Amino acid sequence: MSSTAPTFDETLQSITTIKLNEIEKQRIAYQELAAGIFAAKNTGEVDLDDKESLLQRVELLIATVKQWSGAGKLKGTTVGGKLQLSNLDFWMKLAREEMGFDLKIIHGWRETLEAHIQHTSRRFDMAKLSGEIINTLFAYLDGLFEPEEAAQALDKVRASIHRFGLALEAKYIGQRDVFCAIRSLLATGLMNEKQRIAIKQITETENVVALEEVARVLNLRMASLETWAWPQEGLKVTMRRHYLGLQWKAHLKQACLLFFRQAWERNSISEAQETAITKIKTIDQSYDEDPSYPRSTRSINAIRERTYERVFFLSKLNEPENSNTYNDFVNMNETDARQWNPRLVAVKRMILHLMATEHRLNHLVHNSHAMIHSIMANFTPCLPHESILIVLAYLGVPQRWIMFFQTFLSAPMIFPGERTPRVCKRGAPVGYAFSVFFGEAIMFIMDVAVNQRTKGLRLYRIHDEMWLWDADVKKCLKAWRVMREYAAIVGMEFDEKMTGAAYSGLASADAPFLPKGELKWGLLKFDCTTLKFIIDQNEVDLQIVEFRRRLAATKSVLGWVNIYNKYMAHLSRNLGGLPVNCLGNAFIDDLIKTFKRVQEELFRESNLGPINHLRNMIGERFGIHDLPDGYFYFSTAAGGLQLFNPILKLSAFDKSISPPTFNNFPVRPSGFMATTGTSVPDVGNVPIEMKLNSKFYGDLGDYQILKSRWEQQRVRWGPNGIEEFISFQEYVSLREIHLPTWGDAYDEMFNNPPAKEVAPVEVGIYPGCVHLPSKLGRERAMGVYAMWAESLYGEDVANRFGGFEIVDKTLILADVVDLFRTAEKKIN
């Protein structure tokens, strides 16, 4: 393939080849040096029982270590973490002069120095292996684009990217460009609040000096920022559309939040409940014990309100433009979704957690729970233009902007096999910020309709995918009718194949009218028999078939690892990611069994696991067969292949808490609701997933404490003086709207189970050992998964290579491996 511009693989391969050639020269030189030393030992030239012969051997080893100045040279004067060369000269002299000097000491010096040379030699071998794997990948990519048509297309892509890069480098970024770029960055949410405040001052004051100074910096650095995603043509116009789209997205969120905070229907509190809350405040001495975390923010309803506003309300408008909806990498962020502006992968995971928790709560308290899930069919490509423009005009968008949006939507498109462009009559161009803006404006009306018509029900939505639930099945049915009505008016349709519902609890005449179909989330489905989310093994089987096909088609070692990690992460993500308390400890066991079955099916013919498969692959291609297991699981930064082990990650969760024990409960007062066949658990021995149940049965004791305090204080209430305390029925009616203990138990449902404590591996002081001040520090720096991998495989790796660094940092090509780990994902 020929090209006027340097290509990605040509440039990268050139750099890699130079480095690999230098590594190979040094490897050969070092191993020749080491071979001569060990050859003398093996041929018997060294008498290991003679003191002088041993000392000469040590002197030769010291000279070898000191004279090597290439990669892997000794840093400092300590060998093997314990032998000080600065002291060894004195010791050697003393050993020669002192009669009867213990030969074991000299043997210790010799063994430490020989081990250092062997470890360095092995690191050179592993560096060579890493280079050969990368070169194999280069060869594979060249073969992939070898056909003539593929080669010509690749040349055009490369030339276009090259010309674009030159144009972008040559373009001067002025003050106005900086102003627009800063506003765009503010809309992406990529900065923390301190940075936002500092940079926002520049835009608000339009400080010319500051803008010019930032422009000088951005002319050097802005081209590398991910937010500047310039297309190949129409740079100025496209950037303007991108910028304007971001601005409209941000303002739509702000404007709709005003409606949400001022006019949104919320569950009302009756006058009797208001009185009950006031009475509790009167005699509850701990009510204001923590002003920074008031009780009003700790109820279940308060948590629901915050979660919906921060996470789900117009959630697509929160997403930074450069973020992936679903992350394919193994080390995906498992951040709590209830923070401000979480990524959509965390938002969708939060949906699962909410459904599981709300089902536990409503089934326990109300003995009834209904759920509905659906998705719009071909949402963005089929949005009617008229509906978009009418909704925007109705929301107050000026006429000039309506005309601009109409022009934008009427995009000319050339379809395959045609030469004449056709003007789009439906749909919005996919991938533009304006497309998200149009879609969220349309769906905001549906959010409002559901909320207003049902008097408080929330439509949990991620752009065009929707979930709703409630203890009252009639509310859910009404919401579903409202949604279908609105969709028919604006010209949208629901995907019937992706629509499903579930109901559990007391027999209901309305439940049969719920949408047909199973309620699913990813590879999970709700089982109305067990009343839990379970793994849909039929769907997993389909994933295994595709998984096996993709692995079989992958020829390179890095490509195989990348595809394996990608699909294991895909399975993990669609099975709920990291488990949380609301799904239960048994769900962790089900996940482990599923991943075990996946591995058994993938390697059914060979009866090998992923490690042995890779070991055989490397042995056949590179002639190396004795690789330690840690090489496959350790990170690329340490010289490993960074194979993902989901079973190890799941097994790190502590499921050792014993099941609850049950005792006879006291006589239930009027209003005490309990599921048939249950009794009061011993609260001190309850798994966290059962906290809601224990709180349910603990209400009676809490109520009696408050009632006793009321009677002891003889609280005067109202014009009639002393009055009775609230009834138990009135007290339990506050479970969701006021009681903070219920809110705390509800909140715990979204936490991950505790991780098992990891006993750190002690292999002495060695090169590559990370010294951290405490176990907590180690966990924060490495993560529990990495620490368990270290504890399981670290000792073997350290014995083989003298530490946890399989390849010396100066030799490792982790940056190149990372590039291909992200690039080959799409090619493979």
Image (tube, grey):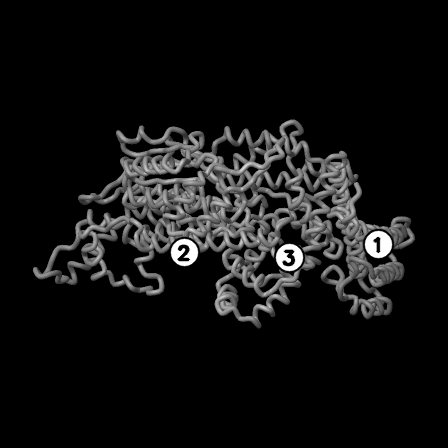
Residues under labels 1 and 2: Cα distance? 61 Å
* Label 1 SS: helix
**Kind of residue sitting beneath label 3:** Ser
The disc label shown at residue 26, or none: 1
Q: Nearer the viewer, residue 60 or 217?
A: 217
* Label 2 SS: helix
Rendered residue at 45%/40% (across/down): 385
Residue picked out by circle 3: 224
Where does residue 438 sit, x and y in percent of width and height?
Answer: 45, 46
**Kind of residue sitting beneath label 1:** Gln
**Kind of residue sitting beneath label 2:** Gln
Q: Is residue 795 above or below residue 541?
A: below
Q: Can residue 753 be seen in this view?
A: no
Rendered residue at 34%/40% (across/down): 469
The disc label shown at residue 254, or none: 2
Q: In this view, does 665 lie above or below 494?
A: below
Mark 1 or 3, which is nearer the eye?
3
Mark 3 or 2, which is nearer the eye?
2
